[in-house]
Image: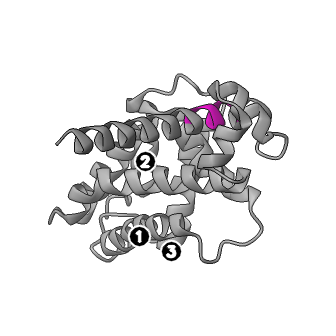
Amino acid sequence: MELRLISERKKEERLARKKRIIDAALSVFHRDGIDKTTMEEIAIEAGFGKATLYYYYPSKDEVYSEIMVTGWQSLWLEVEETILNNSPPKRKIFEILEQICHIVKKNRNLYKFLFTAPNYIQSTENLPWKTYQERLYSVLESTIEQGCKEGCFIDLDPKVILHAIGGLFHELLLGKKDKLTEQEFELMISNLLLSKPRV
């Protein structure tokens, strides 16, 4: 029993250290950019020696990958229940986007990184986080497509609409409109998605 408690405590300590490293990396990436960040800077920000950092993550790419997997997986898990409900397309898409908006606002540094960092890598093949990203994008695209067929969304290529939605999130995270309210965001989405009333 005592060994099990020690083992659990070590596991918790290990997870806490990894989280501290990831939070530190996000801060340094945000401040200096991925290319200019060094493992030494991440170690200093985390308050660890380089040896400890290398024990958990052998390279900056490993840190990068961990952030991407953790971020996209948690985003997927948080919206999964909404995705699985049987709401009509219009209701479902608004619920998913509203939920994503709330999630993003809770940890802007993480999601700013998630939505912009893929530009850092040359190849996007065989990356574990892509599974979650592609699942989410596929659900959004198919829901938009269904809404277009039913006439409740503007009749455009769903890929184009999804790309435009991505632009709105980019503006929300990176643009000068740091004080964009949820009402303003909802209005932008409404203007983008909703079809004009038929005469």
Image location of residue 106, percent across then percent down: 42, 31
Image location of residue 128, percent across then percent down: 52, 68
Query: Where does the magenta region start and end?
Result: 23-28
Residue found at the very far right of the displayed protein: 36
What residue lies at 55% left-to-right and 53% top-to-bottom? 66
Among the two numbered marks 2 and 1 on one chain, the one whose residue lies closer to the N terminus: 1
Q: Nearer the viewer, mark 3 or mark 1?
A: 1
Q: Secondary structure at mark 3?
A: loop
- In this picture, residue 59 sits left or right of residue 191: right
Quadrant (top left, top right, bottom left, bottom right) of the C terminus:
bottom left
Depth order, front residue of 30/199 = 30
Q: Does residue 144 show up?
A: yes
Asked if residue 25 is among those painted magenta in the image, a careful observer would answer: yes
Q: Secondary structure at mark 2?
A: helix
> Distance from label 3 to label 1 (Cα)?
19 Å
Which residue, given by chain and number where applicable, does mark 3 sit on? Answer: 157
Which residue, given by chain and number where applicable, does mark 2 sit on? Answer: 189
Q: Amino acid at mark 3?
A: Asp
Q: Main secondary structure of the magenta part?
A: helix
Asked if residue 196 is among those painted magenta in the image, a careful observer would answer: no
What residue lies at 64% left-to-right and 39% top-to-bottom? 52
Q: Amino acid at mark 2?
A: Ile
Depth order, front residue of 60/108 = 60
Residue 19 position (above or below residue 156)? above
